[in-house]
Structures are given as C-alpha cells and as structure tokens.
Image: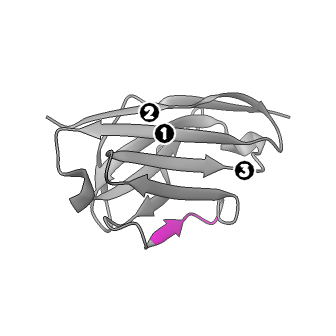
C-alpha cells in the first residue's frame, strides 16, 4: 500500500524559505518518478516539479523555476522540495506524488504553505 507523508509546511513571509519533505513507503521508491504538485486556494491541482528515479533529471514549472529545488534520497525513501524567495502566489497545499515521466498518481495528505506579503 502506497503511503506518502508530507511535512515542513507553514507560514512564512514573502521572500522567505521553506523545505518540504515527503516520506514514502509501500512501493519501490527508487524506481519511480516523483512529483510535487500543489493546490492554491480555490484552484485545481498544478504541477510544481518532478524528478526521475535516479535523481539527475529535474523539471520545474515556469512559476517556480530558479526558486525551487527538488531532490530525493533513495536510501531513505525521501523526497524534498527546497523553496526560496517565496511569493504570495506560492500559497497552496503541497503534495508529493508517485508518478511516471508524464503523469502524477497517488498523493499524500498534503502540507499547507502560506506566504504572507
């Protein structure tokens, strides 16, 4: 049974930083693409970043490119998202998700990130 648990969210001022973590179990973490997706208030899910199983291919949405960094540690089944220079439009519930090259699938329960201006 796939189990994903996000942590690290919180309230931060504009321009600040946060680091999100996602612990995983129930599947072969090191074999799957992993994603970060988010849901801003009143909006649908949008992808933020994804990383290949080995960790050397990383992609970002235009809205976070240059500010966010995705990473993973396959030895401990952990996914990370380093978020810098946060903006009010980054306010959302952030989810880690198991996925493929082009799609995300099962998600965790999410962690709230709120950026105050």
Q: Secondary structure at mark 3?
A: loop
Q: Are marks 1 and 2 in contact (CB under 8 Å)?
A: yes
What stretch of residues is rendered in magenta? Answer: 58-62
Comparing 45 with 33, the one in front is 33
Indicate yes or no whether the magenta region holds residue 22.
Answer: no
Q: Secondary structure at mark 1?
A: strand
Give the residue displayed 42% in from the left and 39% down from the top.
22
Near mark 3 (Cα within 10 A), the count class, few <14, some 14-19 or many ≥20, is some
Reading the image, the residue beneath label 3 is 84
Expressed as whole percent of the image width and height from the top left, the position of residue 34 reads 35, 55
The quarter of the displayed image where residue 101 is located = bottom left
Reading the image, the residue beneath label 2 is 6
Expressed as whole percent of the image width and height from the top left, the position of residue 64 reads 65, 58
Expressed as whole percent of the image width and height from the top left, the position of residue 48 reads 53, 55
Give the residue displayed 65% in from the left and 65% down from the top.
65
Q: Is residue 55 left or right of residue 66?
A: left
* Majority SS type along the magenta span: strand
Reading the image, the residue beneath label 1 is 21
Structural distance between the alpha carbons of marks 2 and 3: 18 Å
Comparing 44 with 86, the one in front is 86
Quadrant of the snapshot with the N terminus: top left
């Amino acid at each position: 049974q796939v189990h994903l648990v996000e942590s690290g969210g919180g309230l931060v001022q504009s321009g600040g930083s946060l680091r999100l973590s996602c612990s995983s179990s129930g599947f072969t973490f090191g074999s799957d693409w992993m994603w970060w997706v988010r849901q801003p208030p009143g909006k649908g899910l949008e992808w933020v970043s994804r990383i290949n199983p080995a960790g050397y291919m990383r992609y970002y949405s235009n809205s976070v490119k240059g500010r966010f960094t995705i990473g993973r540690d396959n030895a401990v089944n952990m996914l990370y998202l380093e978020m810098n220079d946060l903006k009010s439009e980054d306010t959302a519930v952030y989810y880690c998700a198991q996925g493929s090259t082009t799609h995300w699938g099962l998600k965790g329960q999410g962690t709230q990130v709120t950026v105050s201006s």
